[in-house]
Amino acid sequence: MAGISGHWAFAFGVLGNIVSFIVFLSPIPTFYRIYKKKSTEGYQSIPYVIALFSCMLWIYYAFLKTNVTLLITINSFGLFIETIYVGVYLFYAPKKAKVYTVKMLLLTVVGGFGAIILVTQFLFKGVVRGQIVGWICLVFSLCVFVAPLGIVRKVIKTKSVEYMPLLLSVFLTLSAVMWFFYGLLLKDINIAAPNVLGFIFGILQIVLYAIYSKKERAILKEQKLPEIQKPAVIMEDENTNANRKLPELTQEQIIDIVKLGLLVCADKVHVATCPNDTNCGVKATNNVENIPKLQTVEAN
């Protein structure tokens, strides 16, 4: 029975690695945009610093345990990719954001993680050390999973899902499911418990996305502008005293009319005329000569 449980735990651990691998790669489009525009564009570094700190904590916890190798693999990759994210952010961020990011790194990665290692190594021994680090990981993971409440509040307030990508919510939910069963089968509450909260918040985000995305589509449909009607020319017939509608102008004909109007406006000529069809000392320009003469038609 223990062997079957171990096989299932390994299967869920592998699936958890795959899903978490995709989650860790999800910010790549954001950082590609930062690279192309050579600017962080107001993005915050806190999520990446916190993710880096979380990976370090779980790696430390995994080394204190004996049967959680799959925690080491995925968090080692997470540590690597989050370090790259923070490095790229520091390279392109403005001075104020750089200073803030460095302070956060010193507070969490250097100060926080260093203090945890020193305290647990010198004050606790054996199994107790693993339990203390496990509780720290559990509390920190709960805080991380509670963080999306800010996004949930923003979605409800703005009635817009612009700031809550659906795919990321789905993968975070799947990740919580996989790691919950991994921890449950290994009988490790420090791994299983935080992912219960992660699953609940993941489902909540998916439900909110389904509700407010439909409302957004309905609002956009209602606000759709009316179509522009094609121009038509109406000519009044004096004989019949009726309005007769001419054929609609095509787009090419409209363009030709506009071009002709611009040409006429560009070739304006000011000519002063005197009685007896003579010019008052003003020479006619070439443009006047080029103007076609109007023909007179005698009415029958």
Image: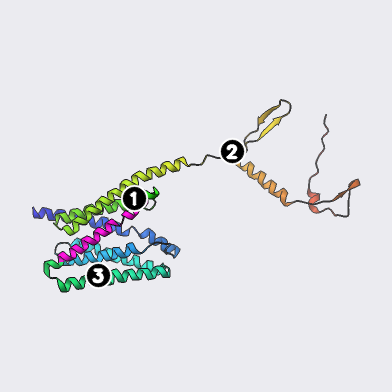
* Observer-nearest of 154 and 238: 154
Q: Which residue is mark 3?
A: 113
- Amino acid carrying label 2: it is Lys
Q: Quadrant of residue 191?
A: bottom left
- Amino acid carrying label 3: it is Phe
Above/below status of 228 relative to 143: above
Q: Which residue is mark 1?
A: 166
* Observer-nearest of 163 and 243: 163
* Observer-nearest of 35 and 100: 100
Above/below status of 246 relative to 197: above
How much space separates mark 3 and mark 2, taking CA atoms? 69 Å
Q: Dot 3 surroundings within 10 Å: few (below 14), some, or many (20 or more)?
A: some
Tell me which residue sits at (28%, 69%) in the image.
Answer: 109
Judge from the rendering whether residue 202 lies leftward or rightward of residue 243; answer left or right. left
- Residue 196: percent from the left, percent from the top? 22, 53
Q: Which residue is mark 2?
A: 230
Q: Of the residues under marks 3 and 1, which one precedes in the sequence?
A: 3
| Residues at discs 3 and 2 in contact (Cβ within 8 Å) | no
